Image (cartoon, rainbow, N blue to C red):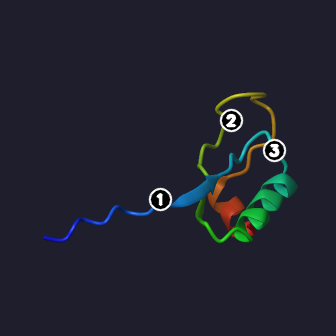
Amino acid sequence: MPMPQTPRPRFGIMTAPSQVSYRDVLRVWREADTIPEIEHAWLFDHLMPIGGDPNGPTFEGWTLLSAL
């Protein structure tokens, strides 16, 4: 009976859409796009910051994703 194959690890990134500038998020996503091992990227869709300044910058997830 053949040995079961161990699934290979998969790597991705997740960036927060709050307390950062669009330029910073874009820079991280562009750099990640140059690394072949990074297969996926994620945002979360909270409309208010989870932490930090409640009046700080927060991007809506779908709009930010389309801009990236």
Q: Quickly name the residue at label 2.
A: 49
Mark number displayed over residue 20: 3
Q: Position of residue 33 (x, y in %)?
A: 71, 69
Asked whether the residues under the numbered discs 1 and 2 touch, taking CB atoms below 8 Å apart as contact, a structural biologist would say no
User: Who's the residue at 34% across and 61% down the image?
Assistant: 6
Mark 2, Cα crowd under 10 Å, few <14 / some 14-19 / many 20+, is some
Q: Hey, what amino acid is under mark 1?
A: Pro
Residue depth check, mark 1 versus mark 3: number of the one nearer the observer: 1
User: Who's the residue at 63% across and 61% down the image?
Assistant: 62
Q: Position of residue 22 (x, y in %)?
A: 83, 55
Determine whether the residue tagged by mark 2 lies in a helix, strand or loop. loop
**Which label's residue is closer to the chain start, 1 or 2?**
1
Q: Residue most toward the left? A: 1
Q: Hey, what amino acid is under mark 2?
A: Pro
Residue depth check, mark 1 versus mark 2: number of the one nearer the observer: 1
Q: Nearer the viewer, residue 46 or 21?
A: 21
Please state, as top left, top right, bottom left or bottom right, where the C terminus lies in the image: bottom right
Looking at the rendering, which quadrant does residue 49 occupy? top right
Residue 12 falls left or right of residue 10? right
46 up-or-down from 51: above or below? below
